[in-house]
Amino acid sequence: MPTAERELDATGLLVLPGCVDMHTHLASTPTFTPLDDFFHGTRAAIAGGVTTVLSMVYQEDGSLRRGIERGLRDAERSHADFSFHAVVTDPGADAIAELPSLVRDGHAGLKVFMVTKRFLERTADYLALYAAAARLGIVVAVHAEDHLLIERSTAALHLAGRTGVAYFPASRPVEAEVVAVRAAIGHAARTGVAMYLVHLSSAAALEELRRAKAARTARMYGEMRPLYLYLTREKFAQDDGALFVGQPPLREQADVYAAWRATADGTIDAIGTDHVPYTRARKLAPGLSFDKIPPGVSNLETMLPMLYSEGVRKGRITIERLVDVLATTPARIAGLAAKGEIAVGKDADVVLFDPERTRTVRAGELHSACDYDPYEGWSVTGWPKIVLLRGAVAYDGEIRATPGTGRFVPRSPLT
Ligand SMILES: [Zn+2]
């Protein structure tokens, strides 16, 4: 190795690879500007040890590329390295025809919302898309919840006048997730596509994934959303329950245990934040029925510290598993060959992590633009001290990266 310009003392610190978050919503759409855009969201990311973020970008006027181009413009102010999943809202022949050139340009990832009515109406087109994706090595991320069961449950609750946030979990029952996960596994098996099931929330859905992986009939990967490891549906009984609304909902304590077990035993491959916060005022706006509360919370800055504090320190997972689910495996699934490991030839994305530092989570001290945090008041032990992005200090208690420091990282097809 050549001599370094500068030496950093890591005595007493853990030296971890920078985290790769496969699931964020930092890019805009023609009708949506996120509170945490690439500027704000990647400040939170960097301070939390997340050096690479993947954002959803939405197909625009039928064109996947147009959505990606919007994402690239938004990301010009990124502090972290970034890449994309192209969300397919119109799975016609035009979208399929775009795929080879997208793969060539490093966009080997799609996202499909099974939860939409559109998916029901156009399942055949989506299956054709999956088959094309399979041929090209494109990974398809899937939000698996069943539209009909949610629609039916929601309508019944509305009819009974039960529109408060306390009824949010009942509107998106576990069965809706299980039915969709089963179907998704079948779709993956019959088309050969590599499928990444995002934010699995229930013990029953995790069991479906576990069984499918054991059977090896489909190429399945599973993602855990951090919230499901720490919180239960009891949050929705609180006056400020709307602050915790995301999709799928928080579940029971038994599901929390199952989430830890699946994270520990490899059923879950990656943890992704699904970072998309809204202000307290937006979440708690008076008169919002449970289905109109904007879904999503802030998570980028706390993902690594919380998993260390609650997972590693409390003996639920090993430090090796933490590195696996936060860095190595998401980088591999996303086709980011230079990321996710500390090794010769890889980018020097490194977190010098202080395993003994205890902080109380307070939104005011975090870097998200959001004015609350779902873990407000939690005492968390283990925080990044210094974060390097491609060998340069990006965070050392202050954000040192500047807008535009982050670069696009092309995604290779998964072979
Ligand atoms: Zn999402």
Image (cartoon, rainbow, N blue to C red):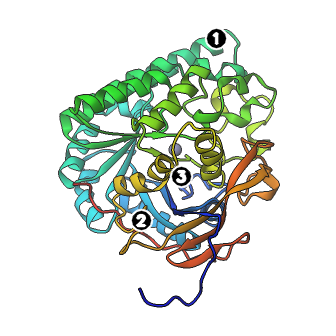
What amino acid type should be assigned to the residue bearing mark 2? Answer: Lys
> In the rendering, which numbered label is found on residue 21?
none
- From this viewpoint, which residue is outermost toward the top? 160
Q: Earlier in the sequence, mark 2 or mark 3?
A: 3
Which residue matches tag 2? 339
In the image, what residue occupies the spot 77% across and 42% down? 378
In the image, what residue occupies the spot 75% across and 21% down? 237
Q: On screen, 154 above or below 308?
A: above
Which residue matches tag 1? 159
Which residue matches tag 3? 24
In 3D space, how far apart are the residues under numbered discs 1 and 3 (Cα atoms)?
Answer: 34 Å
In 3D space, how far apart are the residues under numbered discs 2 and 1 (Cα atoms)?
Answer: 50 Å
Which dot, 1 or 3, sits closer to the camera?
Answer: 3
Q: Residues within 10 Å of mark 1 (few under 14, many from 20)?
A: few
Which dot, 2 or 1, sits closer to the camera?
Answer: 2
Residue 337: % across, % down = 34, 65
